Each structure stands twice: as C-alpha cells, then as structure tokens.
Image (cartoon, rainbow, N blue to C red):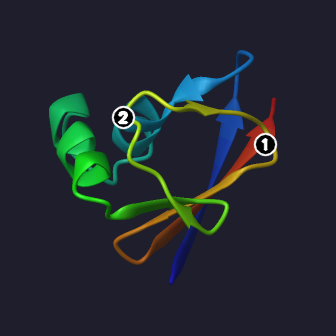
Amino acid sequence: MQNVTFELTGEFVALNDLLKLTGVVDSGGAGKVMVANGAVRVDGQIETRKTCKIRAGQTVAVDGVRIRVKAA
C-alpha cells in the first residue's frame, strides 16, 4: 500500500476534495463516485458521506493508497 501524507492548512478538508488534492482521482466528481460506491475508508470504517470533514490525525484508505492527514 502506498502511503501519502497530506498537510492540512485549515480546520478540515472535505473527503472528495482530499482525494482530488492527493491525486487519487482526477476530479472532485470522481472522488464523489468512489465515496458513494463505498470504496473509501476513514479510520478503518467505510465512509459514504462525500463531503465528510477530514481533520488532522485521521487516515483515509482507498484503492491501495493510505492518506495520513496531519496539521500544518
């Protein structure tokens, strides 16, 4: 599994935007589809809310990529 670290500049980032910003998907729309299909896990649990707020300390896993979110 590929590990990616994402530095959060604000309080949170929407899940579909995080997938786009880290290069997992090409667009926010593609991220929304992945989330809606149940392909994304947040802290080990399947997440189906497309704009779920991801905060520092959380881990997102999708399609062989693990994204660790940390504060800037």
At label 1, the amino acid type is Lys
Question: Which residue corresponds to mark 1?
Answer: 70
Question: Which residue corresponds to mark 2?
Answer: 50
Q: In which quadrant of the rendered view does residue 6 lie?
A: top right
Q: Residues within 10 Å of mark 1 (few under 14, many from 20)?
A: some
Say whether marks 1 and 2 touch (CB < 8 Å): no
72, 67: nearer the viewer:
67
Which residue in the rendered view is the most extreme toward the top? 10
Q: Position of residue 25 (x, y in %)?
A: 25, 49
Q: Position of residue 48 (x, y in %)?
A: 38, 47
- In percent of the image, x 22 and y 57: which residue is there? 37
Q: Is residue 42 left or right of residue 70?
A: left
Q: Residues within 10 Å of mark 2 (few under 14, many from 20)?
A: some
68 shown above or below 31: below
At label 2, the amino acid type is Lys
Q: Which mark is residue 5?
A: none
Task: Locate the C terminus by quadrant.
Answer: top right
Q: Secondary structure at mark 2?
A: loop
